[in-house]
Image (cartoon, grey):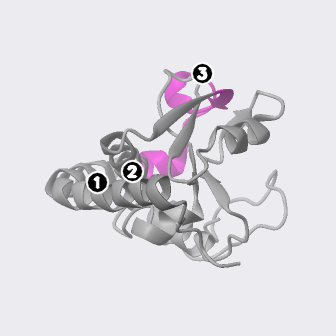
Amino acid sequence: MDEDDPSKGYPEPTIRGPRIGASASARRLLERVETPFFMFAADDVIFRTPGWDRKFVKAMPEDQLAVLWPYSASRNKCFHCFTSMTWHKLVEVYPDKFRHFGADGWIVHVAELCNRLISVDAVVEHMHYKFGKSKEDATYTEARQGGAAGEAHAYLESTKDVRKQHAGIILKAIDEFRQTGRDHRPAA
């Protein structure tokens, strides 16, 4: 959490620090992951489906190379995604270039290029104000006014070839797993 965010209502442990942007903070959190899988989700979501986490683990292919997303009650978009440290080890989930917007677009595009974007029958409801489900969010408004959306769009447009290269790496690992059973899972 940004050090200037109110801490009321957030569970512990909570990591607080200076505002560094969505990508940088997520990448720092990835350094702490001790499980084979992780999920990116906004702080304004409600997991509506009981056992949603088990559904995601069960839906992950054996090679652990996919990006899974829940049915979102908010226009059925991929705002939140579940993937593996195997994926991250091979191509990193996304570069440290996004202040607020764009990171989900990066990983989703790579998964689509690999035909490995898998929808899971679980509802994760995004309680965002743009859907009329909460009050306006100051961080979102500040990012939009500060040009973060335009920066993200420009970066995504200028790096399509990089995502194609990442898709090639993932597809090669998937094929290798099919051929030999050798996986690319991080060592324990």
What span is colored magenta in the figure? 121-142
Q: Quadrant of residue 127?
A: top right
Cα distance, mark 1 to mark 2? Answer: 6 Å
Cα distance, mark 3 to mark 1? Answer: 25 Å
Residue 92 in picture, x, y percent from top left: 43, 67
Cα distance, mark 3 to mark 2? Answer: 20 Å
Residue under circle 3? 73
* Local crowd size for mark 2, using a 10 Å CA cut-off: few (<14), some (14–19), many (≥20): many
Residue under circle 2? 101
Q: Amino acid at mark 2?
A: Phe
Residue 151 in picture, x, y percent from top left: 25, 56
Q: Is residue 46 left or right of residue 138?
A: right
Q: Quadrant of the C terminus?
A: bottom right
Q: Which residue occupies the foreground of this view, 116 or 94? A: 116
Q: Earlier in the sequence, mark 3 or mark 2?
A: 3
Q: Amino acid at mark 3?
A: Ala
Question: In terms of secondary structure, where does tag 2 sit?
Answer: loop
Q: Quadrant of residue 174?
A: bottom left
Q: Which mark is residue 177?
A: none
Residue under circle 1? 152
